[in-house]
Image: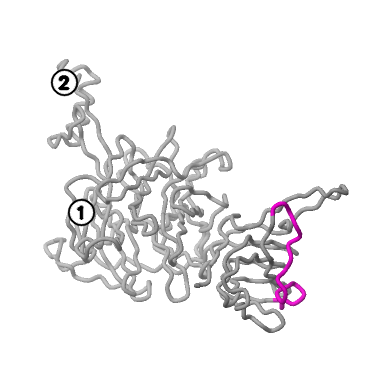
Amino acid sequence: MQPQLTPFLDWYGIWPSHRKLEDDGTVWSQDPPQGIELAPELARKSEVFFHKERPWEQGANLHINAMLHDGGRYRLWYGVQRLDDITRSYVCYAESDDGFTWQRPELGLCEYEGSTRNNIICAGRDHPLGWVFIDPSAPAAERYKAVGPGANYFRDGKPDPEMDSARFKALLAARDLGDVSAGEKAQGIEIRQQLHGATSADGIHWQNLSTPVFDAGATQLDTHNLCAYDPHQEQYVAYLRGHIDRRRLVRRASGPQFTSLADPHPCLLPDPLDALDDDIYNPCYTPYPGTQPRYLMFPSIYHRIASTVDVQLAVSRDNHQWIRPFRQPIIDRAYEGGTYGQLYASPNLIAANGTWRLPFRGYQRRHDFLRRGATSYPEDGEFRWACWEPDRLAGIEAKGEGRVTLIERPCSGRELLLNFRTAPDGWIKAEIVQTIHTPPQPVEAHPGFSLAEAEPLTGDSIAEAVRWRGQTDLSTLAGENVGLRFHLYKAKLFSVSI
């Protein structure tokens, strides 16, 4: 049996207690949690990891389309939006061994100023590469998949390939003025937002799909729309921009086939615990590192009145229901140069070289609307990593003395490993306890694994074994369901493995 890792991202798995009334009138609570709170771990920010080096990157805004750690290398697909001509945009590719020193291979795919000696994959929307992911269930020729938004024009519910933006606006204006025939006025014209797809064997050479993978109708897809294959549920899942009453939110669509995503519905919304002017801007969906079925989002929260954007944490155990355990940033706007106006994180959360990294783009400017007559935002923004120690996105924290019991879980028979940090005078002690009963009974420790026999752990460790009278071996409990009880003083416990 392999040890089971439990990160503390929500209150599930924490024993909340029962209260019992005895025959003699005595009232007591069964192992209640005391003196603890669930607290996020604010990300550290790296130095800028990507700089403008090529002519097509100068005088342009860059943004992260996708970051993968594939075959031991960091692979980056990034967008380039020219400021001298807002109709010119490119998707480029770079790769790195360490996430800081990048190579831009000459791909020979797209011409820029008379030469194809560049790292440009495509111009404009020649391919829908707004997001790239690896599909482990696909044949080799389709191992890489991509999605990107696009608008199509419809007339009477059917695609109208002859319609373009100028003709659409002219027809709308003519209808408003009555300068069209009755027949033309009766024709329903609309723009439908669709998510288009592409496949690739190497992430560089792409084949577009002939039909959209998702039709969003009139809902805008003007943010980072994501798709991934969930191996635990064996289906494709997309997280998309959505709206209710002009408030931004995240929608979820899914399906067994990449080409048939369906059932779009809101899955992460602002609620009354948020400030009244808060919107959820984009999802930044990413699986939890490792093989266990846990899921994460790092949504950008748009504070409308302040016109700022920071990043919070959302978690899910089933890739359907989502919660935000904290209404505070896990990536804040502060950095060594001052304060960003906006932050936008981009998948994926990469576990490599003993560190967890999530790429983000920081902008000095706020989310203010452009002045009248302006055509584009000024050149701005930089790429950095948000960094955490492994399994340290959040934890159970005791600022003084605290106690908490975890419900039963299988014991592998090896060791109990803790991921923790204490103050210089802080400590953690652990007990292995018997199954928690209902109706309540006292929760007793297994012989040899009690508080009296536990040795305190101090300092800062990703995986330190608990000792009871100098021993760490749990072979006598192998295969049993056991509870865990922790006593903390000025300490934060991030995860446990048993």
- Report whether 56 appears left or right of 487: left
Query: Residue 407: within the magenta?
Result: no
Question: Marks 2 and 1, how far apart in space?
Answer: 34 Å
Three-letter residue code for mark 1: His
The answer to whether 241 is drawn above or below residue 379 in the figure is above
What secondary structure prevails in the magenta region? loop
For disc 1, the neighbor class at 10 Å (few under 14, some 14 to 19, many from 20) is many
Label 1 sits on a secondary structure element that is loop
Q: Is residue 455 visible?
A: yes
Of label 2 and label 1, which has the lower sequence position? 1
- Report whether 69 appears left or right of 461: left
- Report whether 253 appears left or right of 13: left
Report the magenta residues as a range.
438-456
Identify the coloring: one colour
Quadrant of residue 481 within the rendered picture: bottom right
**Residue of label 1:** 127
In the rendered image, residue 352, in percent from the top left (x then y), is placed at 42, 73
User: At x 60% / y 55%, what residue is drawn?
Assistant: 11
Label 2 sits on a secondary structure element that is helix
User: At x 58% / y 74%, what residue is drawn?
Assistant: 478
**Residue of label 2:** 184
Query: Residue 455: within the magenta?
Result: yes
In the rendered image, residue 394, in percent from the top left (x then y), is placed at 57, 61
